[in-house]
Image (cartoon, rainbow, N blue to C red):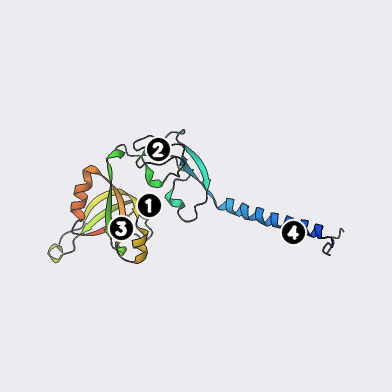
Amino acid sequence: MLKLPTKLPRNPRTALAIALIAISFVAALALSQEAHQSIQVWSANHPLLIGQTITSNDVKISRVLLPENASHYLASSVRIFNLKVRSQVGVGELIPVTALTKEVGVSHLQSLPVRVARSDLPTDLQVGQRVDLYSVATSAAQAQTEPVLAAHGLIVESIDQKSKDLGGDIGIVLSVSKSSVLSVVGAIAYSRVLVVRDAI
């Protein structure tokens, strides 16, 4: 049976070499763990303009580290070809979930800000998800009024994290077609707003 030497080498050069090897091993292990945590997402080869149809020449796959907001960007596993650009993306930028859509009339979408009570929307609501807006009467005179579906299938563009952390009403921005903006605003202007998302 082969016996390995148990005594440390007395030669300083040998000890230094062993230390460098150990450091290299630790560094390689750290790099390996970091690479393991990275994900592959789509990024833009050149500026993507509103209304443009995505082709293979427009995008590429990039490996990046996104520990907290990975869900905000399109993973490489998502099929994005033939989708329409609904918000401009700069060259080299990662492509947000909300930047592409299947809808044809993307240039007719507008961003509608809405303030919602903390208890009236899902606590884990995320950018890119689709929601319905319900208008609920708040005054005593309207107590007998049934809740109204103000809008269906709106995309969440952004969530005001500062207002969310402070504990008051939460500000969100929703994508609404130009033709529907007035009706949605009218339905929720003097009412309590409920944000409903399909269960996940």
- Mark 3, mark 1: which one is toward the viewer? 3
**From mark 3 to mark 1, how far is it between C-alphas?**
12 Å
- Image quarter (top left, top right, bottom left or bottom right) of the C terminus: bottom left
**Spot occupied by residue 8 in the image (x, y as percentages of width and height):** 82, 64
Horizontal side of 61 relative to 151 (left or right) equals right
Question: Which residue does the numbered mark 4 point to in the structure image?
Answer: 19
**Spot occupied by residue 196 in the image (x, y as percentages of width and height):** 30, 56
For the point 43% across and 39% down, the residue is 80
**From mark 1 to mark 2, how far is it between C-alphas?**
20 Å
Category of crowding for the residue at label 2, using alpha-carbon neighbours closer than 10 angstroms: few (below 14), some (14–19), many (at least 20): many
**Cβ–Cβ under 8 Å for marks 4 and 3:** no
**From mark 3 to mark 2, how far is it between C-alphas?**
28 Å
**Spot occupied by residue 186 in the image (x, y as percentages of width and height):** 18, 52
Is disc 2 placed on a helix, strand or loop? loop
**Spot occupied by residue 46 in the image (x, y as percentages of width and height):** 44, 36
Of pointers 4 and 3, the one earlier in the residue sequence: 4
Question: Which residue does the numbered mark 3 point to in the structure image?
Answer: 171
Of pointers 1 and 4, the one earlier in the residue sequence: 4
For the point 14% across and 66% down, the residue is 140
Question: Which residue does the numbered mark 1 point to in the structure image?
Answer: 127
Is disc 3 placed on a helix, strand or loop? strand
Task: Residue type at mark 1: give it.
Answer: Val
Is disc 4 placed on a helix, strand or loop? helix
**From mark 1 to mark 4, how far is it between C-alphas?**
48 Å
- Mark 1, mark 4: which one is toward the viewer? 4
Above or below residue 133? Residue 79 is above
Question: Which residue does the numbered mark 2 point to in the structure image?
Answer: 48
Q: Nearer the viewer, residue 127 or 142?
A: 127
- Image quarter (top left, top right, bottom left or bottom right) of the N terminus: bottom right
